[in-house]
């Protein structure tokens, strides 16, 4: 954070500056009100520590002038002439706290920690509403599908490191939910989780949204703004749909990733960033690089650890588990007591292709809970297209318990394992047979050409 110290005693300016710098903050110290106003006009500060006795000046007269210049500035008053009346007057004029002199480093540190926590909470409030949809519990870090389980295991291991993560996958596969879960399983979990949606704003507004701006930086910038990079300090910044980030902003993001530095729009002061970056996209970034829409150096910087989030159609074993989680949550919200899904409903959900992935499943379960009139969700409560297209969307048409020959069921099982295993040897180990035996069975399953 940027700290302004206003005190006429050189020793106080020096020791207080050393304290804040030791905590990793940037400090400017001045001796009088004129210099303080000049500094506030020149650049933005997060916190000002103001002495009330500045030679022949009264700090209480300077306090409202500082807040007039920057309404978001947090002012902490300290003075050797402490009294209840002075403290009350300082608070009435807009001071955030009052510290009597002499003070200890621990006193200053505690006050500063309160200010930091309050500022972070203020920045998270605006982001909270956009993330309410993530409050419905979904087992995104667990899967009964071996291939998906391996992917999520890699993601979970990477979460424990400071490495940048890139989540790839179709729209609606749960990348945002996965990012939040990875944050909660990372060393940054004590810090905030801040989401920035890259395609949601114009280039100018997106740059301000990410990095912040100073008053007067552009038309409509009537006050300073911290930005989401600052809001995510000590936590995680999630860049959703990074593939749609405008080319003009990409060099600034690259600098943030490489040097952990950035500047607010309209100022030249360089700021340090302490954030962990998780990015997500449904685009083919390599293709975007070749087309000239995405910087190659930024792609490689983001692509430290890439996690390919599979579509729901490749997570057949997880569909009902995810659906039941949604059912329980939405039933509670609607005040309904539902015992689950009917057999035909479960079969239809497992066979449907789910082109909208987890997002589509979530919407349909919520709709079914609202429309249901019985003790459980039946097929009639789901959109007609799910029951109408089940035959077309079935991956094979053969399931355990179907009235088919045992040989056909064996072929179906072998085919599914072969699709998920990395090699024929790995598939043979899973099936518990010799690779040569699996090769012969596979050959019999393959139709003769012609």
Image: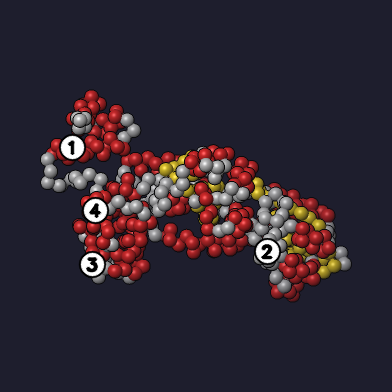
> Reading the chain from its start, which is encountered first: label 4 or label 1?
4
- Mark 2 touching mark 1, by CB under 8 A? no
- Disc nearer the start of the sequence (2/1): 2
Label 2 belongs to which residue? 219
Element marked by disc 1: helix
Say which label, 3 or 1, has the lower sequence index.
Answer: 3
Q: Is mark 4 on a helix, strand or loop?
A: helix
* Label 2: how many Cα within 10 Å (few below 14, some 14–19, many 20+): few
- At 34% across and 49% down in the image, what residue appears? 312
Which label was assigned to residue 390? 4
Using the image, tell me which numbered label, if any, was put on residue 375.
Answer: 3
Neighbourhood count class around disc 3 (C-alpha, 10 Å): few under 14, some 14–19, many 20 upward: few
Disc 4 residue crowd, few under 14, some 14–19, many 20+, Cα 10 Å: some
Q: Going 34% across and 33% down the picture, which residue do you hit?
A: 422
Label 3 or label 4, whichever lies nearer to me, is 4
Given this view, does label 3 or label 1 mark the residue nearer the observer? Answer: 1
**C-alpha gap between disc 2 and disc 4:** 54 Å
Look at the numbered discs 3 and 1 and tell me whether their residues touch, using CB distance below 8 Å.
no
**Image position of 19 with respect to 223: above or below:** above
Foreground mark, 2 or 3, reads: 2
Instruction: Tell whether label 4 touches label 2 (CB within 8 Å).
Output: no
**Numbered disc 3: secondary structure:** loop
Q: Do the residues labelled 3 and 4 touch (CB within 8 Å)?
A: no
- In this orientation, does residue 387 appear? yes
User: Residue 410, labelled with which disc?
Assistant: 1
Residue positioned 56% across, 58% down in the render: 201
Compare marks 2 and 4 and give the one earlier in the sequence: 2
The image shows residue 293 at horizontal and vertical percentages of 54, 45
In front: 90, or 183?
Answer: 183
- Locate the N terminus and report the quarter of the image it occupies: bottom right
Tag 4 or tag 3, which sits nearer the N-term?
3
């Amino acid at each position: 954070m940027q700290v302004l110290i206003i005190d006429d005693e050189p020793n106080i300016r020096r020791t207080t500056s050393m304290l804040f710098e030791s905590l990793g903050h940037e400090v400017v110290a001045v001796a009088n009100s004129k210099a303080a106003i000049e500094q506030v006009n020149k650049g933005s500060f997060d916190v000002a520590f103001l002495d009330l006795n500045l030679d022949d000046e009264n700090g209480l007269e300077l306090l409202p002038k500082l807040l007039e210049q920057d309404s978001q500035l947090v002012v902490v008053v300290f003075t050797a002439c402490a009294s209840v009346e002075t403290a009350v007057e300082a608070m009435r004029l807009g001071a955030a706290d009052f510290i009597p002199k002499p003070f200890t480093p621990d006193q200053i540190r505690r006050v500063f920690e309160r200010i930091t926590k309050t500022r972070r909470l203020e920045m998270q409030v605006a982001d909270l509403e956009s993330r309410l949809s993530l409050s419905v519990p979904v087992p995104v870090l667990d899967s009964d599908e071996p291939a998906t389980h391996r992917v999520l295991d890699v993601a979970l291991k990477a979460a424990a490191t400071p490495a940048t993560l890139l989540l790839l996958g179709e729209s609606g596969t749960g990348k945002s939910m996965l990012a939040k879960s990875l944050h909660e399983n990372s060393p940054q979990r004590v810090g905030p989780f801040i989401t920035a949606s890259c395609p949601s704003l114009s280039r100018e507004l997106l740059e301000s949204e990410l990095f912040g701006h100073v008053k007067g930086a552009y038309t409509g910038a009537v006050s300073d703004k911290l930005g989401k990079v600052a809001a995510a300090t000590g936590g995680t910044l999630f860049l959703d749909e990074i593939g749609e980030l405008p080319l003009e902003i990409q060099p600034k993001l690259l600098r943030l990733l490489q040097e952990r530095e950035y500047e607010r729009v309209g100022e030249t002061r360089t700021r340090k960033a302490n954030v962990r970056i998780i990015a997500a996209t449904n685009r083919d970034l390599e293709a975007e690089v070749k087309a000239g829409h995405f910087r190659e150096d930024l792609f490689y910087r983001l692509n430290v650890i890439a996690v390919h989030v599979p579509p729901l159609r490749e997570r057949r074993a997880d569909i009902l588990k995810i659906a039941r989680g949604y059912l329980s949550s939405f039933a509670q919200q609607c005040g309904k007591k539902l015992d689950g899904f009917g057999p035909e409903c479960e079969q239809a959900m497992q066979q449907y292709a789910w082109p909208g992935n987890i997002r589509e499943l979530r919407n349909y379960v919520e709709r079914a809970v609202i429309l249901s009139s019985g003790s459980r969700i039946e097929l009639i409560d789901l959109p007609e297209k799910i029951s109408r297209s089940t035959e077309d969307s079935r991956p094979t048409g053969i399931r355990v318990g179907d009235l088919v020959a045992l040989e056909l069921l064996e072929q179906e099982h072998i085919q599914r394992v072969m699709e998920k295993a990395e090699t024929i040897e790995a598939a043979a180990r899973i099936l518990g047979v010799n690779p040569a035996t699996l090769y012969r069975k596979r050959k019999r399953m393959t139709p003769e050409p012609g």
